[in-house]
Image (cartoon, rainbow, N blue to C red):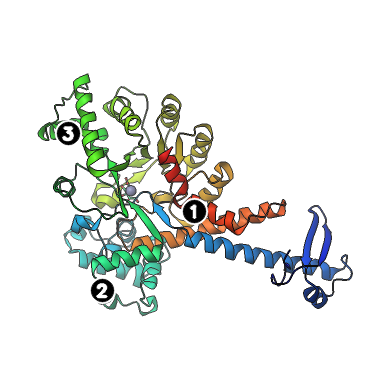
Amino acid sequence: MLCDLCHRNEAHRHIYLFEHGRGRKTFHLCDPCAAAKGTEDSRSGSSLDLLREVQECRRSRLAALVNRAVFSAPIFDIHTHLFDPAFGELLLWGIDDLLTYHYLVAEVFRYLDMPYDRFWKLTKTRQADLIWKKLFVEHSPVSEACRGVITTLQTLGFDPKQRNLAAIRKGLANWKLKNFINHCLNEAGVAKICMTNSPFDDLERPVWQRGFKRDERFVAALRIDPLLLAWSDTAPRLREWGYEVHADLSQKTIREVRRFLKDWTRRIQAKYLMVSLTPEFAFPDAGACAQLIEKAILPHGCEFGLPFALMIGVKRAQNAGLKMAGDGMGRSDLTALANLCAQYPENKFLVTVLARENQHELCVLARKFRNLHIFGCWWFTNVPYVVEEMTRMRIELLGLSVTPQHSDARILDQLIYKWQHSRRIIAQVLVEKYAALAESGWEATPAEIERDAKELLGGAFERFCAS
Ligand code: FIX
Ligand code: ZN
């Protein structure tokens, strides 16, 4: 056994100390450290100081191990809005896209009295200038989304102290996209990225139809919001594309919807199907959304062994003037999810919910249903103090059988900050958990810590998908 203080020499002195109310504490010292500390009388005050010193040493060693494990585990980012470079302009990157991220658009209007329309008429560069001025120059960028820009810029080699947007623009303009992708993935430690792939997107669909050589790091996820949430508008589009569907959900229509799902699942090699839902989502239900889920999505999921991902709790266009930044949220009734998990044990459900108030109930549901895998701190929950709370709660209730985070990155560069910030919190929570375990007499080994970190950052998700 190594010495608790120097962690180099073999420990020959075993010291026992009784702490009132906390039981017997043991620590182990090598002869030189024991001599240096003078450990003759274990009841003396100096022994208590020594105990504190040993505990601090153990804690910082543990923190170093956990940080190393969490920061070196390759990430499977299970939900983003990033694209394989073959999609050209659909893959956003660079400072103007970073600054006009809809999280920052929502924040800048806190300080602007400009009408929404005037803002939207500005070029992207002018919008970015305005956001930089208001959120970074005239106020300190303390919000999570603002701090994210700073973390990203610093990691990319800019000195944030300069507060020089022109220099950042110039510096980033030198990058070639291919190299920049490699650089961002490398800096973020991301190995795989799930895209959000919509056959209903007029820019995206033709690229899939033409075909292209896939970049293996970008994994497809079939996004079906228009199918489930706007059936009456979507049915005519499916007909146009050769699927014989009608507004009523007859057996023939359902067969054709399933043919559509099959074609697209195969074409894009989907890892899962996904939809975002309002807080009012109900299941079972007579409406088109629930009917399509029951009759088409779930049987399709079973046939292909694909999870169905539900992101629950968004209220779209709460303030339409803000465009994408105008979506809001509400507390959901998770009865619908409980019904899905209970009534369809052969289906797999990947779920994240938007309301902080729903997080505990979601964890408890996952304890009841092994076909439910919870993931990510989505959107408004992706702020450090909520991430920390959710991560702790999930690990305490579900152990390592969760995927605590996804990035939801819309701009490539964001992978850097989203993962840097998240890894820090995941590591912090794990340190706390391993330290508590050690107090109870279970010391996790470095190999176990590495294994656990990999589990949280993609392993558990991969296993759930493969199950
Ligand atoms: O539905 C979604 O995938 C959401 O993540 C987006 O709609 C949202 O705009 C977003 O980017 C949140 O982070
Ligand atoms: Zn998203």
Q: Position of residue 304 (x, y in %)?
A: 32, 34
The residue at which mark 1 appears reads as 454
In primary-sequence order, the first of circles 3 and 2 is 2
At label 2, the amino acid type is Arg
Give the spatial CA distance, label 3 vs label 2. 41 Å
Work out whether residue 250 or residue 97 is closer to the camera in this orientation and state it.
250
In the image, residue 376 sits, relative to residue 306, either above or below, namely below
Q: Residue at x 21, y 67 (%)?
A: 125
Q: Position of residue 150 (x, y in %)?
A: 38, 69
Q: Nearer the viewer, mark 2 or mark 1?
A: 1
The answer to whether residue 403 is visible is: no
Q: Are marks 3 and 1 in contact (CB under 8 Å)?
A: no
Element under label 2? helix
In primary-sequence order, the first of circles 2 and 1 is 2
Q: Residue at x 78, y 53 (%)?
A: 22
Say whether mark 3 is within 8 Å of ligand 1.
no
Work out whether residue 353 or residue 54 is closer to the camera in this orientation and state it.
54
Give the spatial CA distance, label 3 vs label 1. 43 Å
The residue at which mark 2 appears reads as 169
Q: Position of residue 25 (x, y in %)?
A: 79, 58
In the image, residue 343 sits, relative to residue 24, either above or below, namely above
Element under label 1? helix
Work out whether residue 427 or residue 182 is closer to the camera in this orientation and state it.
182
The total of numbered circles placed on residues is 3
Q: Position of residue 279 (x, y in %)?
A: 38, 36
At label 1, the amino acid type is Lys
At label 3, the amino acid type is Asp
Q: Residue at x 19, y 41 (%)?
A: 200
Q: Are marks 3 and 2 in contact (CB under 8 Å)?
A: no
